[in-house]
Image (cartoon, helix red, strand yellow):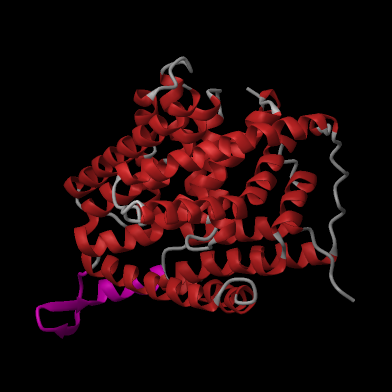
Amino acid sequence: MRARYRESTLFLYALGASLLAFVANSVKSLILPSLINGILGFALGSKKIPQKLLAALLVLNAWGAFINGLYFHNVGDEIVSIQAVTIRSGAVESFLILTLRFFLIVGSTLLMLGLVNVRDLIRSLERDLRVPSGIAFSIAYAFRLFPLLSKDLSEIRIARKERGFTSVVLSPKHLRSILLPMLNISYERAVWGGISAELRGLRLRKVSGRKPLGLGDVIILSALALQWVISLYS
Amino acid sequence: MRASRFTSIDLALLAVAGVISGVIFTAAWTIYNVSEVLAGPVGARIISYGLWFMGAPLAASLLKKPLSAFLGEFLGALVETLIAPAGGITNVIYGFAQGLASELGYLTFRYRRWDIISGALAGALAGLPAVGLDAQLFGVVGTPLEMSLWVIAACVSGAIYGAVVSAAALSLRK
């Protein structure tokens, strides 16, 4: 038997786990929640998000955490000295804390993204968390626009290349020249999309009743509460 | 002001602002990481932070309604979270705080100015919560001089990109 859960419960879980990353500030308090979320999240997330992207995320984060530790927290006992660079205990501790926070935040988000699809999540946010229906429509419409905008962007890049311009944004001036055509196309599309939604009765649409809490919701929320307790009392 | 006062066209335009911002926010991670190596913490903030504050002036310049700045930034952050989990759901927390700060920019003018100046102010104000949240989450806490420089860099970047995106959005309605 599958434990039923609301998609919005996973959103709350990811939000709660991310807030825990803000609150916990030692390796000891972060290690257990980070490992749980990191391992589960990366295992589930790799089904939906390309593994190369996840690997790049890991490398970039490790590099950023290392630079951050070296620049801002390089105090305490000397651990290792490589030519002119001396790495001290404070830098290592900072690196560990940031890496664990990364695992907690990204792991819990990947856990959410691995278990729900975006459309169901938006529907659940509207139905169970009472996100205003207009906002839910905007989020849903944004995801409908996403493939269209990606196509527009690639066409703009081709047009720029053919005119001898770089396809990569290097300055605010370049950014404006890419934004303008994208906005022009999207504006027209949005106006007609909005009129179409209005004519089809967007305002009259009723939001369905809340889905009752299932066993899955209780398990997910208990797991979050348990992680908070373990983290705060360790 | 209730969100229901937005028309369906406004909501569709908000979606446009959200998805364009979400894509830019996602790209900003790479720009930030590269610029931090090449230009250091202050340079990286000037080059990239404003990109993360563009959702608010973009939506406000398109919609010209109260709360549009907040919703544009927040929606962009939500789209960013759902399409590429680089910052995880903390993006939503950043988006919420930055959106509120940018909204203050338009509130300062009592929602009467939706031009490049108010767009630049909205972008600049978002720099304050961004640096504050960086300090809390990533432990990026320097000396008072360094902190001041980072806040100024983030605000300057926000003002530049805010002005650019406002100019682009406003030119549509001419």
Residue beneath the point at 86% across and 73% down: A2
| Residue B92 appears in the picture as rendered | no
What is the x, y in percent for residue B92?
A: 54, 50
In this picture, residue A101 sits left or right of residue B140: right
In this picture, residue B13 sits left or right of residue B58: right
In this picture, residue A196 sits left or right of residue A2: left
Q: Quadrant of residue A97?
A: bottom left
Q: B170 or B42: nearer the eye?
A: B170
Q: Is residue A167 magenta?
A: no
Residue beneath the point at 43% across and 17% down: B113
B44 versus B148 height, above or below: below
Q: Is residue A94 magenta?
A: yes
Residue beneath the point at 66% across and 40% down: A138
What is the x, y in percent for residue A178?
A: 41, 45
A120 versus B150 height, above or below: below
Q: A25 or B80: nearer the eye?
A: B80
Counting the numbered discs, the total is: 0
Q: Which residues are magenta?
A: A74-98
A175 versus B106 height, above or below: below
Q: Quadrant of residue A118?
A: bottom right
In this picture, residue B5 sits left or right of residue B92: right
